[in-house]
Image (cartoon, rainbow, N blue to C red):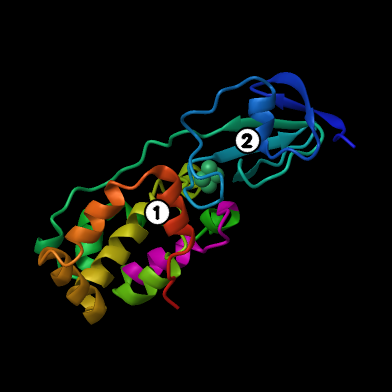
Amino acid sequence: MSAELIPVYIMGKKHYVPETATILNAFEYAGYQVIRGCGCRGGFCGACATFYRFKDDYKLHVGLACQKVVEPNMYLTQLPFFPANKSLYDMDALEATAQQIIELYPEMMKCMGCNTCAKVCPQELEPMEYVAAAMRGDIKAAAEKSFDCIMCGLCASRCPGELVQYNIGMLARRLYSRYIAPNAQHLASRVLEIKDGKFNDDLEELKSMPKEKLQKVYEERDIEE
Ligand code: FES
């Protein structure tokens, strides 16, 4: 049985789309080609941030277009890109301190503690909390609390303090992995093996394989526990 069609409004224009469609599918069903504003289609890349309202309802909703299924009378638009302040830095010249993060993102001190960022986060993170951890120099907590961020930009789009929480979170994760977390020995030895050419022959063999054989090898590969 085919899905019922329901009305939604895309950029103000009414379209009928299958009730089972995600917002992204609805855009495409209506004839839009989504190039910017769509990536993994699996809820991981954060490219498909979307705003919507319902007819006669003041409340503004947000979501990921590849995950959220349409509902009747949604007024939809996408946020294909959000202009965000992003500092440039040399990771080797930084210190893992609150002062360092504040120097690169001084606007973080304007956080009003309104928690609007948490209300719009499709990952159910609490950006205000990881920004606060960064401010007090708890880089580990800031890195861990922001770990599931998909950089969709919705937090920054609603922040009255004009912070770009996701770039602050990314800096905290970089500082944590560069200066605080212990080095992964197995990774260091694997990098050495690669540099020493241990896998060169295998790589050449894979590169010369016909597609079907390559696919079979891929499907039958050993997966590390
Ligand atoms: S397309 Fe990647 S999160 Fe939606």
Q: Residues within 10 Å of mark 1 (few under 14, many from 20)?
A: many
Measured as percent of width and height from the top left, residue 222 is found at 43, 70
Helix, strand or loop at label 2? It is: helix
Q: Amino acid at mark 1?
A: Tyr
Residue receiving disc 1: 166
Q: Main secondary structure of the magenta part?
A: helix
Rendered residue at 39%/68% (across/down): 132
Magenta span contains residue 221? no
Residue 112 is at least partly visible in this image = no
Q: Quadrant of the N terminus?
A: top right
Q: Residues within 10 Å of mark 2 (few under 14, many from 20)?
A: many
Helix, strand or loop at label 1? It is: helix
Q: Which mark is residue 24?
A: 2
Q: Is residue 25 left or right of residue 172?
A: right
| Relative depth, front residue between 91 and 87 | 91
**Location of residue 68 with respect to 98 vertically, above or below:** above
Measured as percent of width and height from the top left, residue 77 is found at 61, 30
In space, the residues marked 2 and 1 are separated at their CA atoms by: 23 Å
Q: Amino acid at mark 2?
A: Leu
Q: In terms of image quadrants, where is residue 103?
A: bottom left
**Location of residue 115 with respect to 151 vertically, above or below:** below
Q: Quadrant of the C terminus?
A: bottom left
Residue 148 is at least partly visible in this image = yes
Q: Which residues are magenta?
A: 120-134
Rendered residue at 39%/54% (across/down): 166
Q: Is residue 90 left or right of residue 176?
A: left
Q: In terms of image quadrants, where is residue 30?
A: top right
Q: Is residue 128 left or right of residue 172?
A: right
